[in-house]
Amino acid sequence: MDLEVSLALRRRRGQPVSADQLAAEAGLSPRGLTGALEVLVGRGFAIEAHPLGGIRLLGVPERLDEKEIACRLVVSRIGRTVRTVEETVSTNDLAWQAAADGPARADGLAVFAEHQSAGRGRRGNRWLAPPHSSVLCSVLVWMPDAPSQGGLVTRAAALAVAEAIEDQCRLSVGIKWPNDLVIDDRKVAGILVESRPAGEASSPVVIGVGVNCGQQDVDFPPEIRPHAASLAMFAEQADRTLLARAILARLDRVASGIQDEAQVAEIRRLVAQRCRTIGRRISVREGEIAYTGQVVDLDPDYGIVLRLADGGIRSFDALTTHVVSLEG
């Protein structure tokens, strides 16, 4: 029952709560609460208990705990199984290894890492962050016609993670096409969707998520420092455990409706509302050719729609287009 106590204290963000109320929330007797608090202190939680001032969480262990992330998590699919590791090359690689177990055992798996030695980003870029500074996770799901749904899954995942951040941090999060989440035009999170055809009715899809939580400017390489940020640079540092839980819950919600036309239309609408690329002048490269124009819309497959210099309208696929520059 210590997990319920830890989550109840985390949700209060350091605000005190009476022992009676905390025990009631966790379904514990006063003696049971005392035992749970002792367990948490032994695990590295810093807890203040005062007869008049109540119980207050002062500090938490730096490492994510898979049992705490999964504790009473209300999901139907994504997050049914949660794993955490201290270090890996890439959480997407761990998810693909698990895919060999098949959908009956591995569908819905979420794997988190404290550090990635070579985390993957879009177009071969690397996602690197100091240990314990970010939420780095990959979820594994099987979907029908998966290879053709990369754009839709990226769009839905970006919306889910943006909403999860807002749930926890009360920050306004935008989507920079195709797979970045931004605050004040600085990247705080990214999405990487990978799929592999399985020759069956459904195929595995891995959704990789990286969210910068606790970094400061000095933690980012100089060449990307003006364009990168963390949640802690805009608000109180996010509780990574609560953020991880919120991400899984939001991903589960959008995944459950991704085959429903009405819900897909709603996802498209909400992403367009958040898209910080629409209305701006952009240069993109498709193959060896560069194009410049104003972004006027996102197409149904999550391609970007440009009005070019000659007045023509053209769509560019997210999977084959590289953004060269974004103005305004």
Image (cartoon, grey):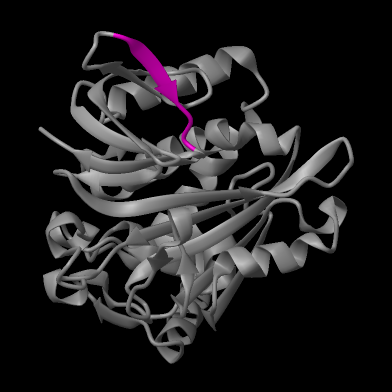
Q: Residue furthest front?
A: 288
- Front residue of 248 and 281: 281
Res 34 → quadrant: bottom left
In reply to whether residue 2 is colored magenta, the answer given is: no
- Front residue of 193 and 274: 193
- Front residue of 208 and 81: 208
- Look at the image and give the residue range highlighted in magenta: 312-318
Please name the residue shown 47% across and 75% down the image.
118
In the figure, 103 relative to 303: above or below? below
Q: Quadrant of the C terminus?
A: top left
Please name the residue shown 88% across and 42% down the image.
199
Q: Is residue 55 left or right of residue 119?
A: left
Q: Quadrant of the N terminus?
A: bottom right
Please name the residue shown 61% across and 55% down the image.
139
- Front residue of 199 and 217: 199
Q: Residue furthest right?
A: 200
Res 143 seen here? yes
In reply to whether residue 314 is colored magenta, the answer given is: yes
Please name the residue shown 23% across and 60% down the image.
230
Res 99 → quadrant: bottom right
Res 7 seen here? no
Q: Please state the horizontal and vertical placement of residue 135, each as a whole percent of the image.
A: 41, 64
